[in-house]
Image: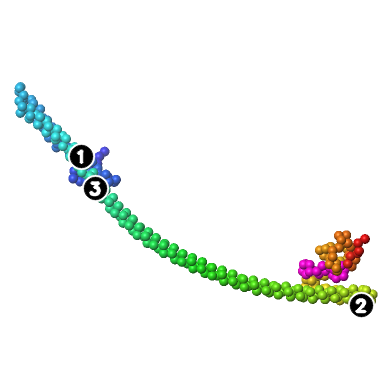
Amino acid sequence: MSTAAPLPTYPDTPRRTTLGVPLPVVVPKWPFLICDALLIALAVWIGLQIKAPLQFWEAACILVATLCGAAFAIAPFYMEYRAEARMVEIAQLTTVAREIDQMSAVAAQITAATSHWSNAQTAAQDTATAAQSIADQIAAESKSFQEFMSAANSAKLQALALETDKLRRAEEAWVHALVSELDLVYRLRVSAVLAGKNPFLQITADFQAQCRDVARRVGLVPFEADAGEAFDAALHQLSDGTSAAATARITETQLPGVRLQGRLVRKALVAVAPSA
């Protein structure tokens, strides 16, 4: 089963993940490890060649060879660290620059929105002022219209009151005239009854019935009290204007009472039997 060969890596080529974080930088370590092995071998060889007693320069050579080998062993890891630190710094600076650009765009949008809001506020104030002016004009027109209607209604009410008063007076006049005519007809019929002439009595009775029928068409209805009926002060009155006793009985009707469209216009003028 074949294995895909790893992609070559270079220290000076920045690599980033999909999230914007740089990938680790791989430095070839085998040259440094070879140098490290050679220097360690050199230090060992020098140590094997030394004869007692140990000289200072011999110890110094062994120490230098060992330190150089250690430095070669550490060097690739230090280089990777420095490269990755540099790449992280560059990535952070790039992110900061991008965020600054975004903040600049946001600041521009905020400035534009502030300008639009200022324009909208100015337009709203102008609209409110215009609406207030229109409302004041409407209120003034409404007040003027109400005053005009009040004056017109007052004039109309005065005219109606005057017309109503005229009609009431005319109604009272023709009611009084019609009642007087009915009274004359009633007295004529009573006179015929007292005269005892049957033909004339029938003629007057028919004439009275026809006159009452004509009066009834305009709502004027006469009524009489029956003989023996109890006296009712709400419907009956005496000729002298006095009040009869509660137990008084009516003997005759001298003039009939009159109702106009259900409203009592005149009480019936009656005579009552003298109290025992």
Q: Nearer the viewer, mark 2 or mark 3?
A: 2
Front-most of residues 19 and 94: 94
> Could you say where residue 119 lies in the image, as x and y percent from the top left?
37, 62
Disc 2 element: helix
Could you give the CA–CA distance between mark 2 and mark 1, rounded to whole angstroms? 153 Å
Could you give the CA–CA distance between mark 2 and mark 3, rounded to whole angstroms? 139 Å
Q: Earlier in the sequence, mark 2 or mark 3?
A: 3
Residue 198 seen in the figure: no
Whether residue 262 is in magenta: the answer is: yes
Tell me the magenta residue range.
253-270
Q: Amino acid at mark 2?
A: Phe
Label 2 Cα crowd, 10 Å radius (few <14 / some 14-19 / many 20+): some
Q: Quadrant of the C terminus?
A: bottom right
**Which disc is residue 81 wearing?**
1
**Residue extending furthest toward the top:** 52
Could you give the CA–CA distance between mark 1 and mark 3, rounded to whole angstroms? 18 Å
Disc 1 element: helix
Residue 128 seen in the figure: yes
Question: Which residue is denoted by mark 3 in the rendering?
Answer: 93
Question: Which residue is denoted by mark 2 in the rendering?
Answer: 200
By secondary structure, the bulk of the magenta-drawn segment is best described as strand
